[in-house]
Amino acid sequence: MQSILELEKLCTQIRRDIVRMVHAVSSGHPGGSLGCVEFFVALYFKLMKHNTDFNMQGNGEDVFFLSQGHISPVWYSTLARAGYFEVKELATFRKLNSRLQGHPATEEGLPGIRIASGSLGQGLSVAVGMAQAKKLDKDQSIVYSLHGDGELQEGQIWEAVMYAAAHKVDNIISTVDYNGRQIDGDVDDVLSLGDLKAKFEAFGWITLVIEKGNDLQSILDGMTLAQKELGKSKPVVVLLKTEMGNGVDFMMGTHKWHGSAPNDEQLQSALDQNSETLSDY
């Protein structure tokens, strides 16, 4: 089992991967990707029981759906570092005929990807459907999903939230990347979500909050508690309070890096701030 220190080094490497991938093609979404690094590392290297010998059905293993597909760089890097495909393929990100498209897609058969995502609001419906299928198959494994807080402005999310509670889908843990920012500014300024914890609870979900969403130990502790809430006839949601652009000082505290690529000088600054590499591609 990897120690927290080893996982933190992996987080540093994934941050390096993210900024290099986006810089190379002057395109992509570094802000949210950087904000979710610790979550992805905790999920894939500690929490999920998954198999790098990928099969689309996911029978007998935990599965993950990324609904906010624009943060594909962090997912691609995590999948590569976990052994789903070779790390060197990260260099093809967003290039012509690459399996690593700007938003995750399935037609090229990239291991680890079960749905195309990026059209916000759809991922929870798919995750709930997979969770129901697992229950029908007597499969005891868990379905995980990740959503942006701005994504919760989409109506389909709340249809799925109601459905999951009404049908007692209690083998799913959905996490909200709760950084308070979206492409046009602060979530509260664009369309406030109100009291999100109270809202999910009113919709019939068990709701937990991880205040330190960029701290590995806090994530591991909080998600372990979430796992213990499964099987109680209610779906589980975790509100993960993250910082967009975490780990790169000039990308933090603003929404401006939601979908902007760093220039050469900015890339070097980001790499200097995350200098302990494991193996750059």
Image (cartoon, rainbow, N blue to C red):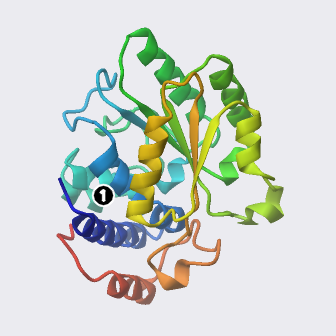
Give x and y (percent) for residue 225: 46, 44
Let me know if residue 53 appears in the view.
yes
State the residue at coordinates (26%, 65%): 10
Which residue is nearer to you in this view: 182 or 161?
Answer: 161
Relative horizontal placement of residue 173, taking residue 271 as reference (left or right): right
Q: Secondary structure at mark 1?
A: helix
In the depicted structure, whether residue 138 falls above or below residue 237: above
Please, what is the three-letter code of the amino acid marked with disc 1? Thr
Let me know if residue 73 appears in the view.
no
Give x and y (percent) for residue 20: 35, 72
Give x and y (percent) for residue 78: 31, 54
Which residue is nearer to you in this view: 98 or 203?
Answer: 203
Q: Quadrant of the C terminus?
A: bottom left
In the depicted structure, whether residue 4 falls above or below residue 262: above
State the residue at coordinates (29%, 49%): 46
Numbered circles on residues, count: 1
Q: Which residue is mark 1?
A: 92
State the residue at coordinates (51%, 62%): 213
Give x and y (percent) for residue 21: 36, 66
Relative horizontal placement of residue 262, taking residue 237 as reference (left or right): left
Crowdedness near tag 1: few (<14), some (14–19) or many (≥20) residues, C-alpha within 10 Å: some
Which residue is nearer to you in this view: 143 or 238?
Answer: 238
State the residue at coordinates (44%, 60%): 218
